[in-house]
Image (spheres, helix red, strand yellow):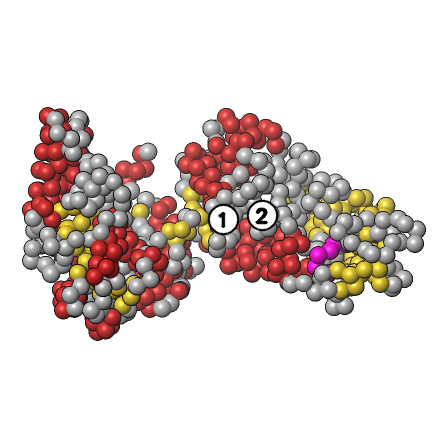
Amino acid sequence: MSGGVDSAVAAARMVAAGHDVTGVHLALSKNPESYRSGARGCCSLEDSHDARRAADKLGIPFYVWDFAERFHADVVEDFVAEYAAGRTPNPCLRCNEKIKFAAVLDRGLQLGFDVVATGHYARLTRSSAGQVELRRAADPAKDQSYVLGVLDAHQLAHCAFPLGDTHKTDVRAEAAALGLGVAKKPDSHDICFIPDGDTAGFLTRQLGERVGEVVDTAGRVVGSHPGHHQFTVGQRRGLHLGVPADDGRPRFVLSIEPVQNRVTVGAREHLAVGVIDAIRPILAGAAVPGRWRGHVQVRAHGVPMPATVEFSADALHVELDHPCEGIAPGQAAVVYADDRVVGSATISGTR
Amino acid sequence: MAAEATRHYFDHAAHSPLRPAARQAWLQAADLVGNPAALHASARRSRAALEDARESIAADLGAHPTEVVLTSGGSEADTLAVWGGVRGRASSGRDLVVISAVEHPAVGELARQWPGTLIAGVDPTGSVMLDELARLVGPSTAVVSVQTVNNEVGVVQPVAEAAEIAHAAGAWFHTDAVQALVSPGLDFSASAADLVSVSAHKLGGPVGVGALLVRREVAPAVTGLGGRQERDLRSGTQSAALAAAFAAALHESVASREAERVRMARLRAELLAGLAAAGQGEGVRVNGGEVVNPAIVHLTAPGVRADDVLLLLDRVGIDASVGSACRAGVHQPSEVVLAMTGSTQDALSSLRFSMGWSTTDDDVAALVRELPRALARARGV
């Protein structure tokens, strides 16, 4: 229970369905700030209090589990290391993969619980063979199947997503009807360990400044930068280039070379990607053998793109029907057959 | 909730259930109208009830009524004694305080507020090392503070010896006796302490009232601003009702003290024997050494996350604790266990089962039944 409206209503629905429910809030920081200004994250004392009050209303036990060290090692340090390696990670996926549906799930199973239920918007169904299937939520605007796409079949078998069939507005109304104080609490959007939203500033504090070259596609130096980790592929703003492009058109980050600390920029059409190669494949449910037609999504709120897809034991190969811009190594590619998540993998290269 | 009737409560060291006699005294005095500090007839009735309570408390603690300074509880009493104590003596060249490493935070936090706070270490049982204490105490020492019974592990501290060390250097001796009023018990006039903190709600009285016993010649500085209603030292409107409830709870505790010590020792032995018989005693250490308050059973179970054991016990109706402080809903590694063993793992693997006036044989039987299961499950076997 993050302290937000979604997990509170998810807990309420599990209680209403007759389950023996215990509320758990995750302490993910050793030094939780007592208040956050602006958009709110998931680690503050106030959020913990809100979660506790929701559990009180529901009449369920409530505990705060301290996963600060695990979170720091598995999510925060990984996030920094991925940027240092020139990739663009998604820490929320990582948290789902390593903390919420791994460390928390394992501890829960050991203590005799059966499932981890969360307020994520996604649906779980069973195939005719009895296998758990992860599917998109009924509310397309809130669908979070992408950030759950890193879960494997074992993890999904111990999950419950009670909000998958519901629209967000109905969840808020339900919270209000239940008398939950979080009914009107704003959604959180930022990365919880970067509450001010300044990812570049956070990375600079972690990695320091290291001035490097910005070059164009011909290899000419067109500017300098304070550290390649400040950039992601497809980025246009904040380049501060001294030399204008020959044709005067805007330039975008095309690639990042961490060892040389070099950022290559160029025209928008160079961003177009038709082929995605990805590693560390994870299957969410039944595999689809061979080459098949499906959809791939590369961002939490990205559009599903039609593609020809092929999983192998240690890789995922995707050929997009239509070229797409701004796909960066480190992002997760989640592959769908209709609305079912077949699996995911971490993007390692694009063409 | 119906389930509450079947719960087994093992957290008396944190808070003891309200005794019926205390509730009755509290409610009776709650309708009194006057402010005890006023002069009219209604006020005199409140004042009379307050002074009746003070005299009763004094008699049960072996103190003179003028030595009883009523406070909001043990923490305020501790604060007055150590912070007020050193500030009261600093101008006469005594600006150091010497405390043990296992004091309650209401004493231990002084180290953050007063740079001249010196800390004497403890041995592996949690008992303060007297030779170290003696080395730290000197002519600049204003106050020495060593609790009578440690609130986490139950060890009974050598307070008579510690007081002797303090007095030899001309320092005041304070002891937090919040956990000590039944076992070993307190007789202020016979004790060597100059300042003693006590609290009502660890005995079955209400939360929100306690006392600092202060010898007549001892004068700590004020630590809270206001009308100084209590012995020109403690400010705030006095509550006759809370004082009456405190007195009633204390009186029952003291009257049954001898029998309760025997009963607590028996329940402790049964709990430990039951644990050993279930085969879960293996590797589990019982802390506090030989001289303990038997009502506090503190265990270290290496390899077990204490929070998990508590969750499992909670699910089967047993309320227990780790005994150490909670921050943002998360148990912090026990500073007491850290001081005893230096092991963070031990500090996160320790559990406290504390008993009191309402604890029954049935409660202990339930704990003997459930604790081995919880330990086994938390160990992952």
Secondary structure beneath label 1: loop
State the CA–CA distance, disc 1 to disc 2. 10 Å
What residue lies at 65% left-to-right and 59% top-to-bottom?
A204
Q: What stretch is highlighted in magenta?
A: A228-233
**Magenta-colored stretch includes residue A105:** no
Secondary structure beneath label 2: loop
Q: Where residue A276 appears, x then y in whole percent?
A: 80, 54
Q: In this view, does B296 lie above or below A189?
A: below
Of B169 and B89, the residue lying toward us: B89
Q: Quick check: do tags 1 and 2 share a chain?
A: yes
Residue at the far front in the pictured view: B91
| Badge number at residue A33 | 1
Q: Where residue A117 appears, x then y in whole percent?
A: 53, 43
Left or right: residue B376 compared with residue B275 = right
Location of mark 2 (residue)? A195
Left or right: residue B351 compared with residue B60 = right
Q: Given contact means CB atoms under 8 Å apart, are the residues at marks 1 and 2 in contact?
A: yes
